[in-house]
Image (cartoon, rainbow, N blue to C red):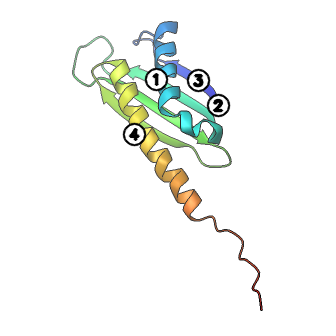
Amino acid sequence: MQFQFNSDSSVMGTENVAERIEEMLRGKLARFEDRLTRLEVHVSDENAHKHGSDDKTCMIEARPRGGRPIGVTEHASKVDDAARKAGNTLAQRLERHFGKESKHKHDPRPDKVL
């Protein structure tokens, strides 16, 4: 699974932040890793230089193999908190997505024995 990290100029997009978020998300989404091709993380600060509550945004887009992208967005006062909340929400959505997928797959009908 590829991991892509993007940040705007108002958020510290240092390597350390990217590494921390990647490690946390890979841990949360490890059980889906073989079913995903790419994970894109976008981190931004909506108020830029102003201070405010819940002004940090983390948007994560997961790309399942052969499926449409699944995206989530969460807000928090710190970048790491926003990423953690978005990771939890994405894990729930992927669980539902792959759970529904496996429910609708049917085994081939066994041959009738006469």
Q: Position of residue 80 (x, y in %)?
A: 37, 19
Q: Helix, strand, or loop for circle 1?
A: helix
**First reached walking from the N terminus: tag 4 or tag 3:** 3
Q: Which residue is mark 3?
A: 4
Q: Are marks 3 and 2 in contact (CB under 8 Å)?
A: no
Q: Helix, strand, or loop for circle 2?
A: loop
Indicate which disc residue 89 carries: 4
Q: Residues within 10 Å of mark 3 (few under 14, many from 20)?
A: some
- How many labels, in total? 4
Q: CA distance from mark 1 to mark 3?
A: 14 Å
Q: Residues within 10 Å of mark 2 (few under 14, many from 20)?
A: some
Q: Quadrant of the C terminus?
A: bottom right
Question: Who's the residue at 38% across and 27% down the image?
Answer: 84
Q: Helix, strand, or loop for circle 4?
A: helix
Three-letter residue code for mark 2? Met
Please say whether residue 15 is visible from this viewpoint. yes
Three-letter residue code for mark 4? Thr
Three-letter residue code for mark 1? Met
Q: Are marks 4 and 3 in contact (CB under 8 Å)?
A: no
Question: Who's the residue at 64% across and 31% down the image?
Answer: 1
Q: CA distance from mark 2 to mark 4?
A: 19 Å
Q: Which residue is mark 2?
A: 1
**First reached walking from the N terminus: tag 1 or tag 3:** 3
Q: Which residue is mark 1?
A: 24
Three-letter residue code for mark 3? Gln
**First reached walking from the N terminus: tag 1 or tag 2:** 2
Closest to the observer: 31 or 64? 31
Q: Residues within 10 Å of mark 1 (few under 14, many from 20)?
A: some
Q: Position of residue 10 (x, y in %)?
A: 39, 12
- Front tag of 4 and 3: 4
**Snapshot quadrant of residue 36:** top right
